[in-house]
Image (tube, rainbow, N blue to C red):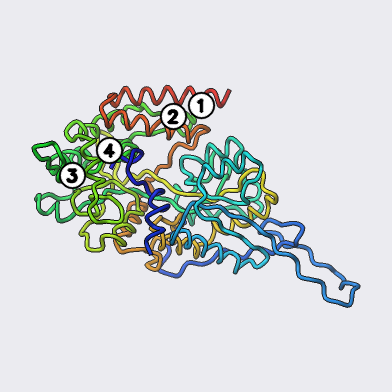
């Protein structure tokens, strides 16, 4: 499926389909523990979690009992809707149950554009979420969200041993905390076991084998229409392919983009062979054909052999194709410097927008939400988006479906890579998507597209840093 064109993305699916659909220590299968209760703030001020409000040493002079302090009221915007939105709202209720001094109003269906507009207009929500792996670094370094570092340290710091390293990398950039991680998404390759059995093949062990297998399995009729697809086109596969070939999208030491890394070019050259053999427009049309499913998707319909996709796809299969016989394997290594078990990472974060009325109160909420294992387990079950907590990896109670364990296994490699958290991360991502489209549709070679991407992003970064 050519995501980014007319296909249905996860975000679009959450906005329409689901509305209609009715840390280095591995823990045992114990129930997750909730985050500590926040000390309740007085009405006129809030404190960081580690401090408690002072209590009066003398009784009030008035014979009547003093009225209870007014609860701190916060508005929280998040991007989930329907039953997914209700799952997030339920965790907000957990926070209020544990912290009765707060009254938080969650607002569903609020995405990045609405958050940016509210911040620009001087009336931001008290807390918000963003699909943060491509945005939060740029938002933090540009001052759109509050730097939480001092408050994190005052609250006792983060116990990093509880979290996957990728979850830490999503929220902390250049040593500064700009968010708390909601969830992270590992990627793998789903495959239709019946199609593999019919073809007499096993899951491939190298990327090159996977691409050739995709070509061999694809069937096209005399008119050029795809009638069975070996592997669905996907822009995320281009990112993951580079990682599987030992490539990188940025240099962690210099902070500079490395789009035209030699391994990236080799990976894109091999992957682009798919689209030289299989017309991408025909493949897209095939993937989007109506097959009697709530979303147009040929893999769920049993007609596509392989699909590179994130962990949430287990939820789609669970809810809309329960009889589909499929499994998942990690993106296989490729090239001369291949790396096993790699995965690109998407995800979401809690952040405090710049300009909120009470930074400490907003932080208290974000801190609790980001540190509640109980809440995180609940969200993983509801969404099939991975909890950032390694401590939940072996908790059967937190699995949304049995095959979700495959994604947990991929995450256990700890070879997950976030999108480069540089000052132009969102810009880089937009330009990356455009470069992928040009390669898929044969407008540029892999080398041309990646050289152009490198030049464009480097130029933009130089402007920002000037």
What residue would you read off at disc 4? Answer: 338
Neighbourhood count class around disc 3 (C-alpha, 10 Å): few under 14, some 14–19, many 20 upward: many
Mark number for residue 275?
A: none
Q: Position of residue 422 (x, y in %)?
A: 50, 34
Q: Earlier in the sequence, mark 3 or mark 2?
A: 3
Q: Position of residue 343 (x, y in %)?
A: 35, 45
Q: Earlier in the sequence, mark 4 or mark 1?
A: 4
Between the C-alphas of marks 1 and 2, the distance is 9 Å
Q: Position of residue 260 (x, y in %)?
A: 36, 26
What residue would you read off at disc 3? Answer: 229
Which quadrant would residue 325 be assigned to in this image?
Answer: bottom left
Do labels 4 and 3 touch, CB within 8 Å?
no
Residue depicted at 44% across the width and 59% down the height: 82
Between the C-alphas of marks 4 and 2, the distance is 21 Å
Residue depicted at 30% across the width and 24% down the height: 447
What residue would you read off at disc 2? Answer: 257
Do labels 4 and 2 touch, CB within 8 Å?
no
Front: mark 4 or 1:
1
Residue depicted at 31% across the width and 30% down the height: 263
Front: mark 1 or 2:
1
User: Please, is residue 223 above or below residue 390 in the view?
Assistant: above
User: Please, is residue 56 above or below residue 8 in the view?
Assistant: below
Do labels 4 and 1 touch, CB within 8 Å?
no
């Amino acid at each position: 499926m050519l995501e980014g064109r007319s296909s249905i993305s996860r975000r679009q699916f959450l906005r329409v389909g689901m509305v209609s659909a009715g840390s280095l220590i591995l823990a045992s299968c114990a129930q997750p523990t909730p985050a500590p209760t926040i000390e309740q703030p007085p009405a006129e001020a809030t404190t960081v979690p580690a401090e408690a409000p002072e209590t009066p040493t003398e009784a009030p002079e008035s014979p009547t009992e003093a009225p209870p302090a007014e609860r701190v009221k916060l508005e929280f915007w998040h991007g989930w809707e329907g039953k997914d939105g209700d799952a997030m709202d339920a965790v907000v209720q957990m926070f209020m149950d544990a912290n009765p001094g707060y009254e938080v109003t969650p607002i569903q269906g609020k995405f990045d554009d609405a958050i940016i507009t509210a911040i620009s207009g001087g009336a931001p929500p008290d807390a918000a979420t963003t699909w943060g792996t491509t945005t939060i670094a740029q938002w933090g370094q540009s001052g759109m969200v509050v730097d939480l570092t001092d408050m994190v340290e005052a609250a006792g710091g983060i116990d990093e041993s509880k979290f996957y390293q990728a979850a830490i990398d999503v929220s902390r950039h250049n040593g500064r905390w700009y968010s708390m991680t909601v969830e992270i998404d590992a990627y793998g390759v789903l495959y239709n076991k019946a199609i593999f059995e019919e073809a007499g093949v096993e899951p491939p062990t190298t990327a090159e084998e996977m691409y050739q297998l995709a070509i061999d399995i694809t069937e096209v009729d005399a008119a050029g229409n795809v009638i069975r697809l070996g592997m669905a086109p996907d822009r995320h596969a281009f990112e993951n392919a580079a990682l599987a070939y030992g490539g990188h999208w940025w240099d962690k030491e210099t902070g500079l983009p490395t789009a035209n890394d030699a391994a990236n070019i080799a990976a894109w050259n091999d992957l682009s062979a798919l689209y030289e053999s299989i017309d991408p427009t025909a493949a897209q049309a095939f993937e989007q054909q109506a097959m009697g499913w709530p979303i147009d998707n040929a893999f769920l319909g049993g007609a596509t052999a392989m699909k590179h996709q994130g962990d949430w796809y287990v939820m789609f299969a669970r809810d809309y194709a329960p009889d589909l016989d499929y499994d998942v394997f990690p993106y296989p290594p490729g090239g001369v410097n291949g790396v096993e078990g790699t995965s690109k990472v998407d995800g979401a974060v809690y952040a405090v927008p710049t300009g909120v009325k009470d930074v400490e109160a907003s932080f208290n909420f974000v801190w609790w939400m980001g540190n509640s294992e109980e809440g995180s387990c609940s969200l993983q079950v509801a969404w099939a988006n991975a909890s950032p907590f390694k401590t939940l990896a072996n908790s059967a109670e937190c699995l949304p479906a049995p095959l979700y364990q495959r994604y947990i296994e991929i995450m256990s490699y700890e070879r997950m890579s976030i999108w480069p958290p540089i000052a132009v991360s969102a810009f880089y991502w937009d330009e990356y998507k455009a470069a992928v489209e040009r390669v898929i549709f044969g407008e540029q070679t892999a080398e041309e597209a990646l050289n152009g991407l490198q030049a464009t992003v480097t130029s933009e970064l130089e402007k920002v840093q000037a």
